[in-house]
Image (cartoon, coloured by chain):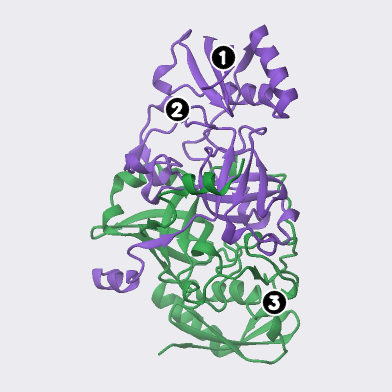
Chain colours: A green, B purple
Amino acid sequence: MWTKEFEKEKMNGFAAYTIQPIGLVHSCFSEKFGIPRQPGLVSCAAGEIALLPEFSREELLKEISGFSHIWVSFLFHQAISDGWRPTVRPPWLGGQKRVGVFASRSPHRPNFIGLSAVRLEGVEKRDKTFFLKISGFDMLDGTPVIDIRPYLPYSDKIDEATPGYADYDLKPNRVVLTAESEAFCIEYENRTGRKLRKLIEEVIGQDPRPASQRKLHREFGMTLWNVNCRFVFTEDDLAEIISCEFIG
Amino acid sequence: MWTKEFEKEKMNGFAAYTIQPIGLVHSCFSEKFGIPRQPGLVSCAAGEIALLPEFSREELLKEISGFSHIWVSFLFHQAISDGWRPTVRPPWLGGQKRVGVFASRSPHRPNFIGLSAVRLEGVEKRDKTFFLKISGFDMLDGTPVIDIRPYLPYSDKIDEATPGYADYDLKPNRVVLTAESEAFCIEYENRTGRKLRKLIEEVIGQDPRPASQRKLHREFGMTLWNVNCRFVFTEDDLAEIISCEFIG
């Protein structure tokens, strides 16, 4: 039986529970705008998780390299100051429909905990710090990581799961670049080894515009690593990258 | 560049982050011993999540019923007093092999946060409390829940994920009951509506014995709801339920 007394007794000691970050995300996504709505949508989004000193020990990662994917639990640190919201408008269905926060993956949730399955590209040690190289993710640069665990196909891959309202055709939009933008990308890639051209195509191809601001020819900008990319949609499914330049 | 200064700056304000439970698990698993190693292994494990008063509002759950499965983030509350361990011996491979805690789903992990995908059977309201009816899970009775979110097939179902060391044949063991145990189950099920017989078969069929204590004919007991079930393995793949009785 569910009673207030039962609840109080069980919750004793957990009313406010303290956690601490174990790592920090280094990501191509320098700002919230444009971040893929879910991990996996942008395969070439590349980054790493730096383990904090207390957790930067080889033994904590023993056998992790055998897994192709890991779950990252993290804090939506930039959402905390805004607070959580009982209902949210997910990007599905043109952002028109309100759903409960527990029926969403919104950052504006109680406890502000995020969860992403990401591809594990490898483990590196530089100086005394261990880094997990990851790709196909949706985390902001500077995101505090609170847990890492393997993706176990036998329990996490649920073939019969139904998608609820998130039954959505993920057809990407077409993306074209001006000649100057193309040239910028080529030079940037040569210098940094970062796949900027492909990242732009994937990120802007999934249409980062807020559902309420989808007017054609309106200019938007987003930052990838240290590059500001400006773009317009000239047709409903065609984005044009009009400039790429270094920020700041 | 990863520097101590960078880290300190970024972590400012997150060094100790406070979270609060949003709900509480009511489960057939009254004790740690025998709990399935992963959710989904025991399809008829049935229970519910009671949302705490602050979160017991219909709007927070709007549209959740369209999803067949949800992710539950919770605290491994019974592991906290023991602390976390850098390496653990997962049940795979006979418990012989040590792996890093971040390469495991062990409860003894930094922050003690657990994650399970469970089947959502429905939503109920009793008095002023909302309950999510769930099945196929691995959570202890009284577990504090810290987040609930939908399982989204398009991002969570990763067909190409590799299982690492957890590449394991999940063939269940055979389970037989004594006539008295069978009779107990039938009466218990008639009175409570709980599928005790099937639960015993599934839970004990996956062999809850610690890897180091697998001697034949050694007696074990485990509690399901308020029933203590005692069993022995009489052959390597055959468990015999020798008694079922009420606890306490």
Residue A214 badge: none
Report the residue that reaches farthest toward the front: A5
Tag 1 subunit: B
Q: Secondary structure at mark 2?
A: helix
The vertical placement of B39 against A200, above or below, is above
Residue A174 badge: 3
Q: Is residue A69 left or right of residue B193?
A: left
* Quadrant of residue B109 within the rendered picture: top left
Q: Which residue is mark 1?
A: B237
The kind of residue on which mark 3 rests is Arg
* Quadrant of residue B52 within the rendered picture: bottom right
In primary-sequence order, the first of circles 1 and 2 is 2
Tag 3 subunit: A
Residue A234, position as x, y percentages in the image: 72, 88
The kind of residue on which mark 1 rests is Asp
Q: Quadrant of the N terminus of chain B?
A: bottom left
Residue A236, position as x, y percentages in the image: 76, 82
Judge by depth and name the residue closer to the eye, B65 or A144.
Answer: B65
Q: Secondary structure at mark 1?
A: loop
* Quadrant of residue A159 within the rendered picture: top right
Residue B93 badge: 2
| Residue depicted at x 67% and y 7% | B179
| Residue depicted at x 43% and y 41% | B104
Spatial CA span between label 3 and label 1 = 57 Å
The kind of residue on which mark 2 rests is Leu
| 3 or 1: mark nearer the eye | 1
